[in-house]
Amino acid sequence: MRFTPQQKILFIGDSITDCGRRDPLYAPLGRGYVKFFHDLQLFRQPDVPVQILNRGIGGNCIDNLRSRWHDDVLTHRPDVLSVKIGINDLNQALCQEARAFLNPAGFEGIYDELLSLTRQELPETKLLLISPFYLSHDTTTDSYRAKVAAILPEYVSVVERLAQKHGARFLNLQACFQEQLRHHHPDVFCPEPVHPNGAGHLFMAEQVWRVLVAD
């Protein structure tokens, strides 16, 4: 995919996408992978001005996206839509039985609903679905981190399955980061397993670029 002038690229998701975009110091793109992607676009396709929108909100689950999908996605009519969601759904499903609708099956049902609506309303919009990720080496103990690592593949599989169903590009960030963890400690990319530092966000931006443009 080579972008064309004036195309609109919209990123939506949770805190990893948000990354300060509502702070006056970092508005409107934040200081994370969306901003880095914007900068890569400036350098690599300087003759193609595009509009990039960040609609991430910290703490969001898939049900939060559903509550704002019309205003934050459909009304903007993006040419390219990137969705990065799932780690908060996993966390709440694991910790709160009352939020069991955020288990993998519930997550898939709401996500599928949103993508079906998008295909109906914006049939020409290109989609990129980004998997959740969790950076930890702990998979053998009874710790919370090991429990997350055990269930995360189910959420990654949901995103991949929906990408296939809706003709979207799929970015398995969990697999991308795990390849890096063969060489680096998780702290290189995340001070804790969920929220990347600058290196982690730069790595994410490079992977998004690869899937949207270079592949």
Image (cartoon, rainbow, N blue to C red):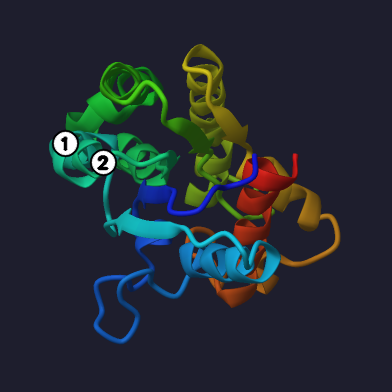
Q: State the CA–CA distance, disc 1 to disc 2.
A: 6 Å
Q: Between residue 141 and residue 15, name the one nearer to us.
A: 15
* Residue sticking out furthest to the bottom: 25
In the displayed structure, does residue 50 sit left or right of residue 190?
Answer: left
Counting labels gives 2
The N terminus is located in which quarter?
top right
In the rendered image, the residue lying farthest to the right is 183
Vertical comparison of 147 with 59: above or below? above
- Residue matched to label 2: 73
| SS assignment at label 2 | loop
Nearer the observer, 106 or 75: 75
User: Is residue 132 in view?
Assistant: yes
Please provide percent x and percent y for residue 182: 84, 55
Q: Is residue 168 above or below residue 76?
A: above
Image quadrant assignment for residue 123: top left
Task: Inspect the image, locate mark 2, and give the three-letter code of the amino acid beneath it.
Answer: Val
Q: Nearer the viewer, residue 199 or 93?
A: 199
Q: Please identify the residue farthest to the top as the structure is shown.
A: 165
Q: Which residue lies under the disc numbered 1?
A: 70
Is disc 1 in contact with disc 2, using a CB cutoff of under 8 Å?
Answer: yes
Q: Position of residue 189 (x, y in %)?
A: 64, 68
User: Can you say which quadrant of the picture contains the C terminus?
Assistant: top right
The answer to whether 110 is drawn above or below residue 11 in the figure is: above
